Image: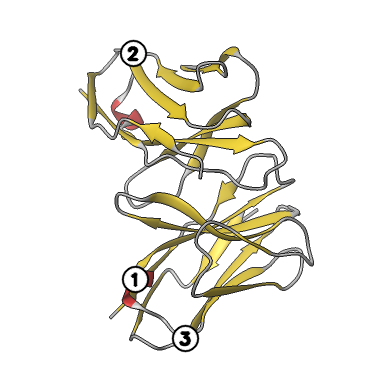
């Protein structure tokens, strides 16, 4: 099992460009999450999907959209990237919302 | 907004010693508590979870929870250089889908 995979590993964008971060899990988990991690700020939840077909905002949703494409895949879209969105983005999944979250390897995003 | 406080460190301990990592949280409704380890440049990985007051042991790791004091700790016995990492505390409220992560404590185990 690959666990949680994320693509791309690293991306450079110019301000105003758009992109989609992809996440997939092969553990048959119901819940999936997107976090960002910034120096001195810790991990902050952007959006989550408690189950297939549902998505909800987390702590820092502004500037992002998500799609739960199916049970395996959960994508994060930046419609118009800003330098403040420079961060490391982690996708995670859990069997149920109250259980252990398993993290993907992360995507490093630099917005110039 | 829940606050999760951890000493940022770095916490330096000699190899073979006990490392003690502490975490306090601001709300009284958190029911589940998770400790994650994160190596530099890597993703967080679960070390332990604890749900009830008291101690929970798993190998060299012991988690301690005191809900009345809103305090959770992680002890690492016989610390090894490979334990050098940042340790993240993450409470979860009952009925919530959200983990709230502390900023982490950086542990350095000196050979």
Q: Is residue B98 visible?
A: yes
Mark 3 surroundings within 10 Å by alpha-carbon count, few (fewer than 14), some (14 through 19), many (20 or more):
few
Please name which of the two marks, 1 or 2, marks the residue nearer to the observer: 1
In the rendered view, does B82 fall on the left or right side of B2?
Answer: left
Sort mark 1 into few (<14), some (14-19) or many (20+) by Cα contacts within 10 Å. Answer: few
Residue at which label 2 appears: B18
Displayed quadrant of residue A65: bottom right
Numbered circle sitting on residue A84: 1
Is residue B22 or residue A59 the one in the foreground?
A: A59
Q: Is residue A105 left or right of residue A48?
A: left
Residue B55 position within the rendered picture, expressed as x and y whole percent measured from the top left: 56, 12
Q: The residue tagged with tag 1: helix, strand or loop?
A: helix
- The answer to whether residue A10 is above or below residue A41 is below
Q: How is the image coloured?
A: secondary structure
Above or below residue A95? Residue B64 is above
Front of the two marks 3 and 2? 3
Q: Is residue A109 above or below residue B78?
A: below
Image quarter (top left, top right, bottom left or bottom right) of the C terminus of chain B: top left
The residue where tag 3 is placed is A18
Badges 3 and 2, same chain: no
Q: Tell me the element at label 2.
A: loop
**Could you tell me which residue is drawn at 35 percent across and 50 percent down?**
A41
Q: CA distance from mark 1 to mark 3?
A: 14 Å
Identify the subunit bearing mark 1.
A
Closer-to-camera residue (A79/B59):
A79
Which image quarter: residue B102? top left
Looking at marks 1 and 3 on the same chain, the residue that comes earlier in the sequence is marked by: 3
Question: For the residue labelled by badge 3, is the local secondary structure a helix, a strand or a loop?
Answer: loop
Chain designation of label 2: B
The Cα atoms of the two marked residues, 1 and 2, are separated by 39 Å
């Amino acid at each position: 099992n690959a666990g949680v995979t994320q693509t791309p590993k690293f991306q450079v964008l110019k301000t105003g460009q758009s992109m989609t971060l992809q996440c997939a899990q092969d553990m048959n988990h119901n819940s999936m999450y997107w976090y960002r991690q910034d120096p001195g700020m810790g991990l902050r939840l952007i959006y989550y999907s408690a189950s297939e077909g549902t998505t909800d905002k987390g702590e820092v949703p502004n500037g992002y959209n998500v799609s739960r494409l199916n049970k395996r895949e959960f994508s994060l879209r930046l419609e118009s990237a800003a330098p403040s969105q420079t961060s490391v983005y982690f996708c995670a999944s859990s069997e149920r919302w109250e259980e252990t979250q398993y993290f993907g390897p992360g995507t490093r995003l630099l917005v110039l | 907004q829940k606050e999760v406080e951890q000493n940022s460190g770095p916490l330096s301990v000699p190899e073979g010693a006990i490392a003690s990592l502490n975490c306090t949280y601001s709300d009284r409704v958190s029911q589940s508590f998770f400790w994650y380890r994160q190596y530099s440049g890597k993703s967080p990985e679960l070390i332990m979870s604890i749900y009830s007051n008291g101690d929970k042991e798993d190998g060299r790791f012991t988690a301690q929870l005191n809900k009345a004091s809103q305090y959770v700790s992680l002890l690492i016995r016989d610390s090894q250089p490979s334990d050098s990492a940042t340790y993240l505390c993450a409470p979860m409220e009952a009925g919530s889908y959200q983990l709230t992560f502390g900023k982490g404590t950086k542990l350095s185990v000196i050979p």
